[in-house]
């Protein structure tokens, strides 16, 4: 139905609709962002983890904080899962959330900002105090028409927030985001020492191993219990938010030292006799960094991938690319459904398999695919399930949705493996 509506309604009318909804929302909810400091976090990867980290730092600094991410929303201590399957929802949801945050006495609200949300003007009428970019790599190319348009969409957040900009100085697209004017600018990274435009948050003595990530900022040592070198950048981004909001480095250190795993992000759901890890990882860059991290941290045993199908109707270019990455790093690759929508799931799977090569095992049913991977595993192996993370649905043809939970399914199928194989696997 949605596709039919888009076809019969002129694009200009749809554009005005998307512009009108946030305006109506800001009127109904009485301009809430004028009464709270709003932080917008965008980027290709790492947004959700950075949002969670930044919120913990601000809370640790004594500020009641709200946030809305692709995983969940939180106002103070009250959390709700994000069941909308949208990073940045429309239909006045953002304005309603900000009003609730204001009414609850929050000083800060952190929003995960997506390029699709910006494209549909969901950021309008939000007074952003801070804009942050985690990183940028090709994504949503078909939706935006080109990578340049995708980058420009991210840039709209920096146009909207002219008070403080926070930029990854190690990212190759930093110059584009530095070109936008702001009263204050912060830069973070591990390589750059000179930043005349503003203040630097630089990590030194960086280590990423089985115990987590460790680094030093100035004379303060950080020990963060999250896996993967890429999380050093997420941590630096969050620390930059904290410092920009007046927190000191010791507060940032203490907050991140007790951070918990973000659901569906490098989340270990089974530990013995083999490890099962679920992760969102829907871009080639994120997928490769994930596999690299697993290979470095756990150098022995096989890596078995359960690779999703990249979502029907969009980003077809990356399917064989992600398949090639999986084939490069993994000893076995089980290709399955993710969110086929109205596209033929078999065609999606076959496209990924082209990149994987002879290691590919095609199983459209996602539960069966996870069960197959578990039966392939032996003691010391690693099973990496990607594409869904903590998402609660699988989206099918005709607008239908099937309730889903990668973590629960993996644990349920693991019980079958234990009973079926007994001591041979365990």
Image (cartoon, helix red, strand yellow):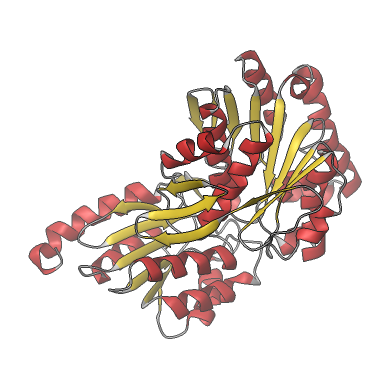
> Residue at point 70% right, 39% down?
40
Residue 260 drawn above or below residue 334: above
* Residue at horizontal 64 percent and vertical 69 percent from the top: 316
* Residue located 48% across and 36% down the image: 255
- Relative to residue 218, is residue 324 depicted above or below? below
Spot occupied by residue 162 in the image (x, y as percentages of width and height): 84, 38
Q: Position of residue 296 (x, y in %)?
A: 39, 70
Q: Residue at x 84, y 38 (%)?
A: 183
Q: Quadrant of residue 90?
A: top right
Q: Nearer the viewer, residue 115 or 320?
A: 115
| Residue found farthest to the right | 12
Determine whether 143 is above or below 98 in the image: below
Residue 367: x %, y % from top left: 35, 57
How many tags in the picture?
0
Q: Is residue 113 visible?
A: no
In the orientation shown, which residue stands out farthest toward the bottom?
A: 358
x and y percent of residue 354 in the render? 53, 81
Q: Quadrant of the C terminus?
A: bottom left
Identify which residue, 67 or 179, lies in the foreground: 179
Apparent side of residue 353 relative to residue 17 in the rendered image (left or right): left
């Amino acid at each position: 139905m949605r596709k039919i509506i888009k076809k019969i309604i002129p694009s200009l009318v749809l554009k005005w609709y998307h512009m009108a909804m946030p305006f109506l929302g800001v009127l109904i909810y009485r301009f809430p962002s004028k009464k709270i400091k709003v932080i917008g976090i965008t980027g290709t990867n790492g947004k959700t983890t950075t949002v969670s980290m930044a919120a913990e730092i601000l809370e640790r600094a004594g500020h009641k904080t709200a946030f809305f991410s692709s995983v969940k929303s939180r106002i103070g201590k009250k959390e709700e899962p994000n069941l909308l399957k949208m990073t940045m929802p429309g239909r006045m949801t953002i304005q309603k959330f900000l009003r609730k945050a204001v009414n609850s006495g929050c000083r800060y609200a952190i929003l995960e900002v997506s390029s699709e949300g910006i494209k549909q003007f969901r950021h309008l009428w939000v007074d952003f105090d801070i804009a942050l970019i985690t990183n940028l790599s090709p994504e949503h190319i078909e939706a935006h028409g080109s990578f340049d348009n995708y980058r420009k969409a991210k840039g709209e957040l920096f146009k909207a927030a002219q008070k403080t900009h926070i930029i990854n100085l190690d990212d190759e697209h930093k110059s584009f985001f530095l070109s936008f004017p702001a009263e204050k600018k912060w830069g973070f990274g591990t390589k750059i020492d000179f930043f005349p435009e503003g203040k630097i948050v630089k990590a030194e003595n960086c280590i990423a191993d089985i115990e987590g990530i460790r680094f030093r900022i100035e004379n303060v040592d950080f020990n963060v219990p999250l896996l993967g070198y890429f999380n050093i950048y997420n941590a630096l981004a969050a620390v930059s938010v904290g410092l920009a909001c007046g927190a000191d480095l010791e507060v940032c250190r203490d907050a991140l030292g007790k951070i918990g795993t973000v659901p569906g992000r490098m989340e270990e759901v089974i530990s013995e006799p083999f490890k099962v890890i679920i992760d969102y990882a829907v871009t080639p860059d994120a997928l490769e960094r994930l596999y690299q991290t697993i290979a470095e941290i756990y150098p022995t045993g096989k890596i078995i991938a359960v690779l999703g199908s990249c979502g029907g109707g969009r980003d077809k270019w990356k399917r064989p690319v992600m398949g090639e990455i999986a084939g490069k790093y993994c000893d076995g690759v089980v290709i399955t459904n993710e969110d086929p929508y109205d596209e033929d799931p078999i065609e999606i799977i076959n496209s990924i398999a082209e990149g994987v090569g002879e290691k590919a095992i095609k199983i459209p049913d996602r539960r069966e695919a996870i069960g197959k991977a578990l039966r392939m595993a032996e003691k010391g192996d690693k099973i990496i399930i990607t594409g869904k993370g903590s998402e609660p649905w699988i989206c099918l043809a005709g607008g239908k949705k099937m309730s889903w939970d990668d973590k629960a399914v993996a644990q349920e199928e693991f019980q079958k493996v234990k009973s079926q194989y007994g001591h041979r696997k365990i």
